[in-house]
Amino acid sequence: CRFESTYSTTEESVYQYLLDIILNCIRCDAGMLLTKKRSWELVETVFNMAFHSSVTPLLQKSAVNTLTHIILSFFSRLRHPESFHCEQPANTAITTPAVSATAATAVAEEEEETEEPSTAECEEEEEDELRPYDLSFLCHLLAFLISLTDTKNPDLASLRYGLSTINTLLEMNGDVLVNHPALIELLQGTFCK
């Protein structure tokens, strides 16, 4: 979200309302119907506000807190397998997302210029965009948190955040994570090395 230069206190309060709306959107019963793409966009928006935005320290702390609640809300859905699709599709590869949203955008634009998707691929992508997030999204989210803990990450605040959030995630949902080998594989991979 960007605003024209106006009174900064008003902007800050609007950002705070946006954080509240995003969190409530994910927490509500309809939140499990969010698509993978939209869910990831919400996470990126809050992450950028928490670590890359030029906002006040108070709003940054609020964004960090909101991001933690968002991540825990996504993973808490694992406790309700009857209403959440916990099976990972067989054709889904888990990749570690980039820490920087701008780098991911640049890579995506580069790929768009080099490849022309076939009609079948476009139809499959459109169908996939309408599906609610599932275990593959949680794997993507966990891989993102793990990428934050890379010792080569120059941003110490996001490194600490990644470690703290993974710790909280394990404390709150460790008993459920064990039932999902894809998540355990991620934790046992680069994170534990």
Image: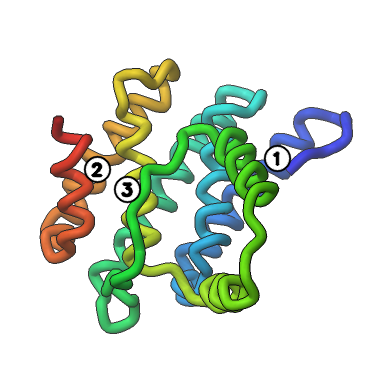
User: Is 70 or 141 nearer to us in this picture?
Assistant: 141
**Spatial separation of the CA atoms under disc 1 and disc 3:** 30 Å
Residue type pointed to by label 3? Leu
Q: Are marks 2 and 1 in contact (CB under 8 Å)?
A: no
Q: Are marks 3 and 2 in contact (CB under 8 Å)?
A: no
- Image quadrant in which you'd find residue 27: bottom left
Determine the image quadrant of residue 156. top left
Q: Which mark is residue 13?
A: 1
The reply to whether residue 166 is visible in this rendering is yes
Q: Which residue is rendered at x = 26% and y = 67% of the image? A: 78
Q: Position of residue 180 (x, y in %)?
A: 18, 63
Q: Which quarter of the picture shows residue 59?
A: top right
Q: CA distance from mark 3 to mark 2?
A: 12 Å
Residue identified by numbered label 3: 142
Indicate which disc, 1 or 3, sits on the residue closer to the N terminus. 1
Kindly identify the amino acid type of the residue bearing the numbered disc 1.
Ser
Task: Report the residue at 41% width, 22% height from top.
Answer: 157
Q: Nearer the viewer, residue 167 or 100?
A: 100
- Residue under pointer 2: 168
| Front-most of residues 65 and 155 | 155
Type of amino acid at the residue the image marks with label 2: Thr
* Image position of 157 with respect to 123: above or below: above
Q: Secondary structure at mark 3?
A: helix
Q: Position of residue 13 (x, y in %)?
A: 70, 40
Query: On the picture, is 81 further left or further right than 188?
Result: right
Residue 49 visible in the shown view:
no
Is the N terminus in the top left, top right, bottom left or bottom right quadrant?
top right
From the image, which quarter does the C terminus lie in? top left
